[in-house]
Structure formats: structure tokens, C-alpha cells
């Protein structure tokens, strides 16, 4: 192996699905043949031009890629300091980055002869994307969603049902994303013959973390080219919100070997990262362990029991993070910070007021950190943040949090 490859941050995972000590494949014997079949199919697809031709056609004509890179002029003026660009993945069909990955996985499922697709979802965007692509291809779709998230994400639940999906409320635990993923894995073990599990983030057993990253890397590839066109150079800083971390890894990965680019992931700080554990900042407040088929940083107690995460954002309240993020954290290539619910709500309003863009609560966390650091940076500094989802789904949550009464007169 050349020294160039050895020094690259883009070559992982290794043959065992590991990013350093993170990742791997911790699954039951029943699931191992399915995982190996998926890995083999993806390895074939990666070198099959017909696969990528279909992906590129759908990304362009169905999803609406490339998504714009937008200079947020009024926001930049309000904050002072650095220039702020937004990678506008909320303009994708279905309103988020999730469909980038779902298309790839469901094309793989069809190549494998699978007719039933299952998925987990928190904020509902992955569920909506999965239901959408299943409707397009005429596949059965079952989406597991925590009962708490079903209640606070009613618009997306309705969208999934309109698209023909069966939405299964999960009542175990706190009824959030972790619990939905648990039940989806149980389903997969039960219906191994015809079912494909479409995971929505860069977590789970190998090859999911790398596969989802590869599909989402279209975000960063486009952003690199668009930034070169807009500024004639790469950005100085890239920033994205992180739950499991797929939108962030999609933006980060194409920049990993550009040492001049600072990379910042923003975790959900909930009510604050302290001993109360009312947050979802796995890297800031957790430690390594095993969950959902991979070793990564997790929120857990002294006995290794997984704790319930907390965030105003249904898409960020997962008590773990993708293994590649854990590796980037330990190597120091990426920085990880946390933002509280209050700060995210302030950023939500800031985006609305300055740019006329209603963001989802997930990228509101990233924007909140942009608002913290931009004023202290020089005017020639360029920040690129991932606006990974639009806020239609979150307006009722935000109204409640801000104590706004939504009436017809409003």
C-alpha cells in the first residue's frame, strides 16, 4: 500500500468493517448470511456502471440533484465575520438528504430479489424517503417508528401512510429512534427470505456504515465542485448536525484528506451535557460500547446499559453515533461539539428571519454553531454548512416550544 493511501482518512473500513477499533459486525447467526449477501451485492454494484447510471439518473431526474450551494448573504451580514454558505439538501424530493441513500439501498434490494422493505425512522424523513421509493418501485414498505416520535412527527406519519407504507408505533423504551431500530432488527430476523432492511444512517453492522456514507457522499462531492466555482477554492470549515451522522458523513467524507478544511460535527445537547444525561451528545458525553451491530460511542451507564437520549429534534435523539465518526473523533480529524435545544430554536428563527428558509430542527443545530463561531472569524473565512432538511415536519414542535398558539387568526 502506498504512503498516500496509508495517510488517507478516506480508505476505511478495513476488511473486517472496522474504522480503527470502531464498527464491525455484531449480529446474530440468523442475520449473518443476509449481511454477507448484502456486502457481496454492494461490492458488485460499486464496479457496475449500470448501477451508477441508474443512481445518477434518479438522483438527477427524481431527487433533483445537484442541490444548490447557497450564499446566505443576509445571515452573513447579521452574524458578521465569516461568509456562510448552505448546501441546500432540504430542496431534495421528500425534503431531506435521506433519499440519497434510500435510492441506493432499494436498487440493491431489487437486484437481490427482495420484495419487502423495512426501515426505522425518528424524525420521519428516512421513513418518508423509504415509503416514497417503495411506492415508485411497487414494493411493500413497513416503517418502525417510536410512539413518542409518531406523536411529535404527525405530518411525516401521514405522508408515509399516503405513500402506502405501514407505520408501526414502537412503545418499548422511550418510544424513540433507538427503540424503532430494535424492533426493525427483530423483524429482519423473523422475515429473512424476502425482507431488506434499509438503514437510514451510518450505523449498524458492516457494510451499512460505509455503504450509507458512500451514497450520501454525493453531498460533499457536489459541495466541493460548487465551492470551487463560487469561491475558486475549498471552504475553510464544513459543519453539519449529527444524530447517527449520515448527512454529516456525506458532507465530510470528500473533504477528509483536505487538511486545510476544518470539519465540525454538531451533536444534540438537549437541556445541556451534564450528569442528568438529558441530551444525545454521544461523543461529548458518552464512551465506547456495542449497539445495533457495531462498536461506537454510546450513552450508557456504569454497567453498560444504554441510556435514553433526549433532544427536541426527533432525528437527533439516538444514543449513539456512526462508527466512522467515532474514529474521526479519536484521530482528531474532525471536531465534535454540542448545541442545546434552546440554541437550536434560536437558530431556527434566525434562518427564517434572515433567509426565508424554514429549517428542520436537525440542521438548526448546525446553524446554531455557525452562529457561535462566524462572528469571530475573518471576513475571508468561508463556512459551508449542510442544510440537510426542511422544517415543515417540525413547525408544531417549535410552536409548542416557543409557546405559540396556532389558530386560524394566526
Image (cartoon, rainbow, N blue to C red):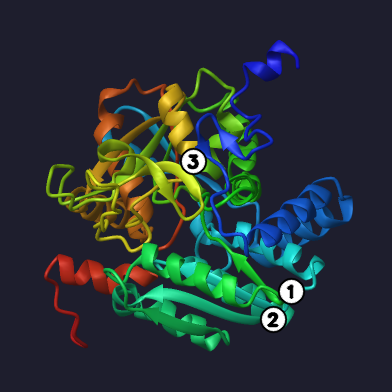
Question: Residue 100 vs residue 121: left or right?
Answer: right
Closer to the chain start, of discs 3 and 2, is 2
Q: Nearer the viewer, mark 1 or mark 2?
A: 1
Percent of width and height locating residue 25: 58, 48
Above or below 87: residue 14: above
Closer to the chain start, of discs 1 and 3, is 1
Q: Which residue is mark 3?
A: 323
Percent of width and height locating residue 212: 60, 51
Crowding around mark 1 (Cα neighbors within 10 Å: few <14, some 14 to 19, many 20+) is: some
Q: Which residue is mark 1?
A: 114
Crowding around mark 2 (Cα neighbors within 10 Å: few <14, some 14 to 19, many 20+) is: some
Above or below 382: residue 45: below
Crowding around mark 3 (Cα neighbors within 10 Å: few <14, some 14 to 19, many 20+) is: many
Residue 344 seen anywhere in this rendered image of the structure: yes
Above or below 354: residue 164: below
Q: Secondary structure at mark 2?
A: loop
For the residues labelled 1 and 2, the Cα–Cα distance comes to: 9 Å
Amino acid at each position: 500500500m502506498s504512503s498516500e493511501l496509508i495517510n488517507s482518512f478516506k480508505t476505511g473500513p478495513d476488511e473486517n468493517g472496522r474504522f480503527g477499533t470502531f464498527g464491525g459486525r455484531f449480529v446474530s447467526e440468523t442475520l449473518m448470511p443476509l449481511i454477507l449477501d448484502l456486502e457481496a451485492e454492494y461490492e458488485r454494484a460499486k464496479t457496475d456502471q449500470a448501477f451508477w447510471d441508474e443512481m445518477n439518473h434518479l438522483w438527477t431526474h427524481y431527487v433533483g440533484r445537484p442541490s444548490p450551494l447557497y450564499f446566505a448573504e443576509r445571515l452573513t451580514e447579521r452574524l458578521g465575520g465569516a461568509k456562510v454558505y448552505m448546501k441546500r439538501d432540504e430542496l431534495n424530493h421528500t425534503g431531506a438528504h435521506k433519499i440519497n441513500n434510500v435510492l441506493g439501498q432499494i436498487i440493491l434490494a431489487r437486484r437481490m430479489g427482495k420484495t419487502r422493505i423495512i426501515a426505522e425512522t425518528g424524525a420521519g424523513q428516512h421513513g418518508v424517503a423509504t415509503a416514497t421509493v417503495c411506492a415508485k418501485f411497487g414494493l411493500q414498505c413497513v416503517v418502525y417508528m417510536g410512539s413518542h416520535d409518531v406523536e411529535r412527527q404527525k405530518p411525516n406519519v401521514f405522508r408515509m401512510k399516503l405513500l402506502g407504507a405501514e407505520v408501526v408505533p414502537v412503545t418499548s423504551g422511550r418510544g424513540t429512534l433507538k427503540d424503532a431500530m430494535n424492533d426493525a432488527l427483530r423483524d429482519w430476523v423473523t422475515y429473512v427470505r424476502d425482507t431488506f432492511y434499509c438503514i437510514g444512517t451510518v450505523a449498524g453492522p458492516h457494510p451499512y456504515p460505509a455503504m450509507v456514507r458512500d451514497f450520501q457522499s454525493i453531498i460533499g462531492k457536489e459541495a466541493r465542485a460548487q465551492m470551487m466555482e463560487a469561491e475558486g477554492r475549498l471552504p475553510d470549515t464544513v459543519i453539519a448536525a449529527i444524530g447517527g451522522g449520515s448527512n454529516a458523513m456525506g458532507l465530510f467524507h470528500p473533504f477528509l484528506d483536505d487538511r486545510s478544511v476544518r470539519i465540525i460535527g454538531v451533536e444534540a445537547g438537549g437541556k445541556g451535557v451534564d450528569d442528568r444525561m438529558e441530551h444525545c451528545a454521544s461523543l461529548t458525553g458518552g464512551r465506547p460500547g456495542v449497539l445495533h451491530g457495531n462498536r461506537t460511542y454510546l450513552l450508557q451507564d456504569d454497567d453498560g446499559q444504554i441510556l435514553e437520549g433526549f433532544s427536541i429534534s426527533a432525528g437527533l435523539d439516538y444514543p449513539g453515533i456512526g462508527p466512522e465518526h467515532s474514529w474521526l473523533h479519536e484521530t482528531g480529524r474532525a471536531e465534535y461539539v454540542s448545541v442545546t435545544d434552546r440554541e437550536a430554536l434560536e437558530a431556527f428563527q434566525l434562518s427564517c428571519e434572515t433567509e426565508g428558509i424554514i429549517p428542520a430542527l436537525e440542521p438548526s443545530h448546525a446553524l446554531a454553531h455557525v452562529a457561535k463561531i462566524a462572528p469571530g472569524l475573518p471576513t475571508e473565512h468561508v463556512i459551508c454548512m449542510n442544510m440537510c432538511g426542511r422544517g415543515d415536519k417540525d413547525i408544531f414542535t417549535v410552536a409548542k416550544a416557543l409557546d405559540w398558539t396556532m389558530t386560524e387568526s394566526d
